[in-house]
Image (cartoon, rainbow, N blue to C red):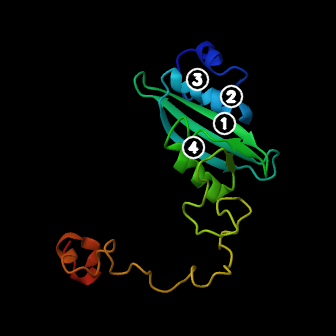
């Protein structure tokens, strides 16, 4: 990011982690996230590249939220981490970056990290009412049985042959190589 002194001014109270492969990582308290992120955006870090949840099972606090922000003009990148206890929440940054809306919903859906003040915190990948968070480390690799047999299924997908599946469309044979059986392909 340039000099660490400039970053310390941007992120008061932040703890700098050792640089790794030229990447700068800072740990801030979860309560200061909105103010810290607004300050970074005001200083040119206008692109929220990613926001993700991490499960550190066996460590207290259990979760981390990791923000990757970028200053595209100066080609600078910074990573911000904050720690979150199980059952606790992190203030939303969706009012600072619109894209955080979807990132926060995914972190909630997959890891179970709540974002206080989020305008629409609901599932984005799993169905409504699903009681688990599949990217938690205590979630079994083979999955869990569902109590909703009409939703989780092993039969043919409901969109088979629909507008997003090209294999059964008559015109797909000319443009989609995966639509041809293996023996018909010419290599």
**Would you name the residue on which mark 3 appears?**
39
Query: Within the image, what quadrant is residue 125 found in?
Result: bottom right
Numbered mark located on residue 141 in the image:
none
Circles 2 and 4: CB atoms closer than 8 Å: no
**Would you name the residue on which mark 1 appears?**
81
**Would you name the residue on which mark 2 appears?**
17
The residue shown at (82%, 45%) is 60
The residue shown at (29%, 78%) is 167
- Spatial CA span between label 3 and label 2: 20 Å
Circles 3 and 4: CB atoms closer than 8 Å: no
Q: Mark 1: which secondary structure?
A: strand
**Would you name the residue on which mark 4 appears?**
51
- Spatial CA span between label 3 and label 4: 17 Å
Q: Earlier in the sequence, mark 3 or mark 1?
A: 3
Question: How many other residues sit within 10 Å of disc 2, few (<14), some (14-19) or many (≥20)?
Answer: few
Number of the front mark, 1 or 2: 1
- Where residue 187 sits in the image (x, y, percent)? 20, 71
Number of the front mark, 3 or 1: 3
Q: Mark 4: which secondary structure?
A: strand
Q: Earlier in the sequence, mark 4 or mark 1?
A: 4
Circles 4 and 1: CB atoms closer than 8 Å: no
- Spatial CA span between label 4 and label 1: 10 Å
- Spatial CA span between label 3 and label 1: 15 Å
**Residue 186 or 37: which is nearer the viewer?**
37
Above or below residue 183? Residue 140 is above
In the drawing, does residue 64 fall left or right of residue 152? right
């Amino acid at each position: 990011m340039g000099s660490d002194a400039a970053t310390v001014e941007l992120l008061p109270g932040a703890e700098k982690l050792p640089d790794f492969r030229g990447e700068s990582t800072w740990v801030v308290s979860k309560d200061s996230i909105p103010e810290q992120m607004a300050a970074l955006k005001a200083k040119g870090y206008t692109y929220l590249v990613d926001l993700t949840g991490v499960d550190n099972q066996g460590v207290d606090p259990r979760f981390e939220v990791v923000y990757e922000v970028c200053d595209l003009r100066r080609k600078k990148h910074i990573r911000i981490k904050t720690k979150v206890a199980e059952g606790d929440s992190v203030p939303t940054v969706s009012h600072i970056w619109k894209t955080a809306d979807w990132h926060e919903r995914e972190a909630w859906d997959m890891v179970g990290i709540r974002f206080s003040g989020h305008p629409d915190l609901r599932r984005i990948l799993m169905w409504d009412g699903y009681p688990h968070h599949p990217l938690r480390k205590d979630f079994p690799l083979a999955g869990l049985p569902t109590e909703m047999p009409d939703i989780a299924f092993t039969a043919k997908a409901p969109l088979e042959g629909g507008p997003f599946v090209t294999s059964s469309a008559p015109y797909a044979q000319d443009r989609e190589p995966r639509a041809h059986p293996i023996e018909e392909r010419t290599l």
